[in-house]
Image: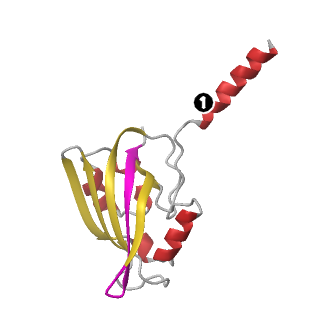
Amino acid sequence: MKRVAGLLALVLVASLLGTSDVHGGFGGGPAGKTIGPSVTATIVIDVTGTTPGTSGKGDTAIRLQRAGASTAVLFNSTVIHSSAVSCQQVLQERANHFDRFVGLMNTWVNSPWLEALLQPFGTPVKAAITDTDYAVCTSVAGRDILSLTAVIQFQP
């Protein structure tokens, strides 16, 4: 009887740990459980300088694609514009298993662009980046450009 109870307790704990829990970045809270098909994103951000408010900092391009549908936006992220983060800091954080972009997108993508970008795929305020890959910093004409790909899913 103790073995059965122990086994059931183990299964319960394992099932609780298996849920999708996304941790926030750029001030974003955890997204909680996400469901449904994913959307692939290509994100390019100007993160020049460590001084908040640097001219051009936060200029962001995002392109989404799922099956035959795609959307794209170009905007200045006010959250990134007012941050002190640099491109190299983002890469160092990723090496230490912290990804500031994972989490709800509505914390760093401004509202009108978030809606235009995500409306064809799901509810924009429920969109969360669940994973990122291929982050790279490129210096172009004195600007530090961060490029990465991301997987986006939606809260139920």
Residue denoted by label 1: 15
> Residue pushed farthest right?
2
Q: Please, is residue 108 above or below residue 124 in the view?
A: below
Work out whether residue 35 or residue 98 is closer to the camera in this orientation and state it.
98
Residue 19, given in percent of the width and then of the height, sits at: 54, 37
Residue pushed farthest bottom?
Answer: 142
Q: Position of residue 112 (x, y in %)?
A: 29, 61
Observer-nearest residue: 63 or 83?
Answer: 63
Whether 140 is among the magenta residues is: yes
Q: Is residue 116 above or below residue 146?
A: above
Q: Position of residue 34 (x, y in %)?
A: 45, 41
User: Is residue 133 found inside the magenta-colored segment of the image?
Assistant: no
Residue at x-position 23% and y-position 43%: 67
Farthest-out residue, left: 68
Judge the density around disc 1: few (<14), some (14-19), many (≥20) Cα neighbours within 10 Å.
few
Q: Is residue 126 left or right of residue 6?
A: left
Quarter the N terminus occupies? top right
The residue at 41%/69% (across/down) is 136
Q: Quadrant of residue 137?
A: bottom left
Judge from the rendering whether residue 12 lies leftward or rightward of residue 2; answer left or right: left
Q: Name the kind of residue labelled 1 in the image.
A: Ser
Q: Is residue 38 visible?
A: yes
The residue shown at (26%, 68%) is 74
Vertical position of residue 6 compared to residue 19: above or below: above
Snapshot quadrant of residue 142? bottom left
- Highlighted range, magenta: 139-154
Q: Secondary structure at mark 1?
A: helix
